[in-house]
Image: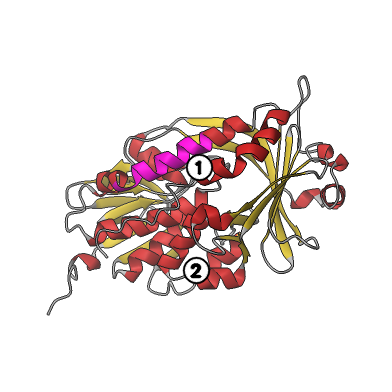
Amino acid sequence: MTAVGEVERMKKILIVGGGIAGLAAARVLSSKGFSTTVVEKTQEWRPVGGGIYIPGNGVAALDAIGLGEKARLKGSVIDHRHIMSGKGKHLMRLDLEKVWGRPAPCLGILRRDLHEILFDGLESVDVRLGTSITSFSQDEQGVDVTLNSGDVERYDLLIGADGLNSSVRELAMGKTPIRRVGDLCCRFVIERPKNLNEWTLYAGKKSQFLMIPMTSSLAYVYVGGQSKEGDSLTEENFLDPFYDFPDPVSSICKSVDKNDLIWSSLDELAPLDTWGNRRVVLMGDAAHAMPPFMAQGASLALEDALIFGDVLSGQTDWSSAAETFTERRKSRVSWAIERNRRREKLTKIPYWVSSIGLKLVGEKTWIEDYSVLAKPLEMENE
């Protein structure tokens, strides 16, 4: 007896981008028997960002992919969020089980470890480093892709998983507006401070210092700040406001090697009506990049991979794959974008208002913000 979809699973898929979205898609699609190729423009794997915090929906996606336990062994389980003032005064401690409805729901992990977990076992996937695409054209049966080598290859489907500044998105849809939310933030990895066992944020009037355990010996730091009226923050003076914070924050900022800091702006991709066009599909940050106020970048990318695999399992005609995928994902992702913007606004209200709000309704607001994402993904073709 022929397995359901056996003929379709021999179709060829090209994934552009070897980040979390691209590798997750490769794992899911290759596990379903599709012939999968990943191209990555860098000459070697260089995960950017140091560490990453994965909320409950992302951990659930890792479990569904079959990598949850490996990720927990490599990373650090997070079950509480603790927020303090810049003077070390307790503001809120949130039990994340209340948010996600299950114990030990979230995870801190080094990006390189997550990449290794996603990459391990992809022997059936054709992975090409130092490779990008320069153009493509599609018809009713497939997509002809021109690589930077000049070679032209034909695929049944093209996936753009190449981030905020996606070349696939630009080739398919032209320039898409990107909104600058904040000019500067930095990230780095440190030796894990003693007694750091939770997601821990020190919030000042215009500065935020977040620490998250990554392994038994390492932690990830995210630093955000806003300049005072008439002043400007630069890479040189960015950490100065934290010198007056309590330890371990002040000592970390005074001793960190500034060559180890990873700098970036905070950007949001303008919402797209459709994530791609027909046989050209966008996922991850290429489709819905947003600043990290909800920490949803990796989690939504992992979910994208699962749902797209489900979409292809239920279709024999891929000529409208982008439209079908968008329809399946739009509502859930739009919720995350809307709640992310609410979080952005909260960073701009007076400090005394936000600190009182955290004490009075912080837990309620946090649970509400993630309520839709806490619901299981709806799979139609499993």
Bounds of the magenta segment: 328-341
**Disc 1 or 2, which lies upstream in sequence?**
2
Task: Determine whether 266 is above or below 377 in the image.
Answer: above
Q: Is residue 73 left or right of residue 184?
A: left
Residue 166 placed where, x, y %? 45, 43
Marks 1 & 2, CB-CB < 8 Å contact: no
Within the image, what quadrant is residue 74 found in?
A: bottom right
Residue 197 placed where, x, y %? 71, 61
Badge 1: few (under 14), some or many (20 or more) residues near its Cα, within 10 Å? many
What's the amino acid at mark 1?
A: Asp
Within the image, what quadrant is residue 30 found in?
A: bottom left
Q: Residue at x 46, y 30 (%)?
A: 177
Residue 76 on the magenta span: no
Badge 2: few (under 14), some or many (20 or more) residues near its Cα, within 10 Å? some
Query: At numbered mark 2, what does the secondary structure look like: helix, strand or loop?
Result: helix
Task: From the image, give the main secondary structure of the stretch colored magenta.
Answer: helix
Q: Residue at x 52, y 38 (%)?
A: 340
Residue 131 shows in this picture: no
* Label disc, if present, on residue 68 of the rendered structure: 2
Residue 110 placed where, x, y %? 63, 62
Residue 333 on the magenta span: yes
* Label disc, if present, on residue 369 of the rendered structure: 1
* Label disc, if present, on residue 346 of the rendered structure: none
The image quadrant where one finds the C terminus is: bottom left
- Identity of the residue furthest to the left in this view: 1
Task: Determine whether 88 is above or below 152 in the image.
Answer: above
Q: Is residue 216 left or right of residue 246?
A: left
- Identity of the residue furthest to the front in this view: 360
